[in-house]
Amino acid sequence: MTVTDCVEMGIENAAKRALEVAWDGVDAVWLSFDVDCLDAAFVPGTGWPEPGGFLPREVLKFIQIIADTKPLAGMEIVECSPPYDAAEITSLISTRVICDVLACQVRSGHLGKRRKQ
């Protein structure tokens, strides 16, 4: 799917479709977040800025839906390049994505449970 496809179908529907594909026949999913999916105006510190990408609010909504659904095996942020990141804008959105994923995993009960001894 392209950014245009996701926006036209709605972020919620795009996330639902992504979840169907990601969880089909597997026990665990690893979330790899590539910052250059965002519009170039919001992530100057990436190796391949892409005009016409997602807006931050669209990405954050998408990520929150993903993280609320099931426990994730782990996650990573890729294409964040500090040498190109004037004013640390790309690092800030990357940190926000990490924090939102962790918060949603806790809120949904997927992370932070302690085993009874």
Image (cartoon, grey):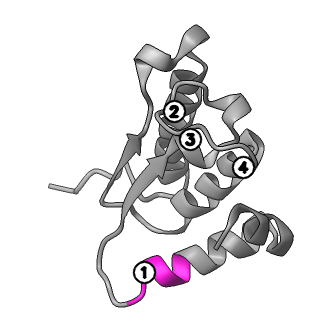
Using the image, determine if residue 27 lies above or below residue 32.
below
Instruction: Name the front one of labels 1 and 2.
Output: 2
User: Image quarter for residue 23?
Assistant: bottom left
Number of other residues with Cα within 10 Å of mark 1, as a class: few under 14, some 14 to 19, many 20 or more:
few
User: How far apart, in angstroms, are the residues tagged by discs 3 and 4?
Assistant: 17 Å
Q: Residue at x 49, y 18 (%)?
A: 84
User: Which secondary structure lies at badge 3?
Assistant: helix
User: Which secondary structure lies at badge 2?
Assistant: helix
Count of residue discs: 4
Left or right position of 8 against 38:
right
Which circle marks residue 100 in the picture? 3
Q: Residue 19's x, y, as percent?
A: 53, 75
Q: Residue at x 52, y 57 (%)?
A: 67
Q: Residue 1's x, y, as percent?
A: 64, 74
Q: Residue furthest bottom?
A: 25
User: How far apart, in angstroms, are the residues tagged by discs 1 and 2?
Assistant: 24 Å
Query: Which residue is under mark 2?
Result: 94
Left or right position of 88 against 54:
left
